[in-house]
Image (tube, grey):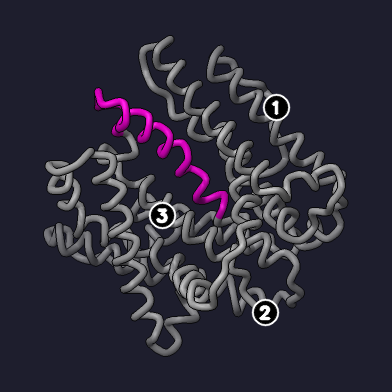
Amino acid sequence: MKKVYLELLRIIAIFFVLFNHTRSFGYSLYANTDQPFSYWGSLTLSILCKVAVPVFFMVSGAVLLGRQESLGELFRKRVLRFLIVILLFTFLQYCRIVRVHPENGFQIGTWLLYCYCGNIIEPYWFLKSYLSMLLILPFLRIVAEGMRERDYKYLFGIGAFTTAVGLVRIYTGYALNLTFPFHGDILLYPLTGYFLANKMQDGRLGFLRDKRITGALFAGVLALAVLQADLYFKTKGNYTEDFHAVFVWILAGLLFLFVKEIRIRGDRTRKMILAMGSCTFGVYLIEDVVRNQLQGMVPFLSSYMNPLLACILFVAACTAAAMAVIYLVKKIPYIDRLI
């Protein structure tokens, strides 16, 4: 049975995905504005939206790592499905390119090359990364079940250390010549999500069950990231997106805990969240098309309101429109199992 808070996290994450793709309309507006609200708001959201992919992987870890299934079931239910998604939606995106540039014609080899080694549109990098996680899922399950709370604390300690190392590199330009044996998307985030959703007890980390504490910590870490990014600009004279990533695993974990403790009341509200959450993967697949169709909203709305608010409304409209499309498409037999 689906958990409402996990679906709510998916909804929040897909909104941030769309904001991450707004470019100068919102994501990088801070670099081209003199308005304080637009500057601080855009800088904050541009850092905050980076939690989107980590949250998706955390939710997947929370849902998948505790399940028992054979290798055959894994490949039939998950790996094969993702391979079909990659083939199908890369094909559809390639058809868009051919329609815009018919002089190049449709080449099956080019399409297959995109499927194999390229991202036909930038957001589709996620599909290959998620497929990688699915392929090592059997090993992740063994690791997740075997780890005790102190082992997870050690994992988080490594994450904190890499954050400190990242800050040193930003300010000094010197990187530590040390390779850590885990990849955030396919190891750290799924294991973190599994722990926070299923293994976290009332021990030393029990205080994080209080959403007031996690909310305050979340706001504090976000403020620290924003102020450091601003300070770096004032000191160095240029912006760096390194601050957009260095605190991301902490922000994603705190957001996960905060949303987990929200109590959703009302069957209608819960059903709506579950329905919207089930559409988020499909939204990820088509949001590029929807954004391109609706991006004229931003200059139009900006003539009546603050440009950042116009961008936020644009993202909300794109999210709602894409969800409506996916909700209807999922009514088609077998398609609902795919997206």
User: What is the distance, in whole Å, between disc 3 and disc 2 at their CAs?
Assistant: 31 Å
Tell me which corner region of the image, top left, top right, bottom left or bottom right, holds residue 184: top right
The answer to if 149 sits in the magenta stretch is: no
Which badge, 2 or 1, is on the more N-terminal residue? 2
Secondary structure at badge 3 equals helix
* Residue range (magenta): 29-55
Q: How far apart in space, not on screen, are marks 3 and 1 (Cα)?
A: 35 Å
Q: Earlier in the sequence, mark 3 or mark 1?
A: 3
Which-is-in-front pick, marks 3 and 2? 3
- Residue that badge 1 annotates: 178
Q: Quadrant of residue 71?
A: bottom right
Task: Classify mark 2: helix, strand or loop.
Answer: helix
Q: Amino acid at mark 3?
A: Phe
Q: Are marks 3 and 1 in contact (CB under 8 Å)?
A: no
Q: Residue furthest bottom?
A: 333
Q: Position of residue 167 (x, y in %)?
A: 59, 22
Q: SS of the residue at dot 1?
A: loop
Work out which quarter of the rendered image holds the N terminus and state it.
Answer: bottom right
Q: Position of residue 161 (x, y in %)?
A: 71, 28
Which residue is disc 2 drawn over? Answer: 73
Is 32 included in the stretch rendered in magenta?
Answer: yes
Disc 3: which residue: 15
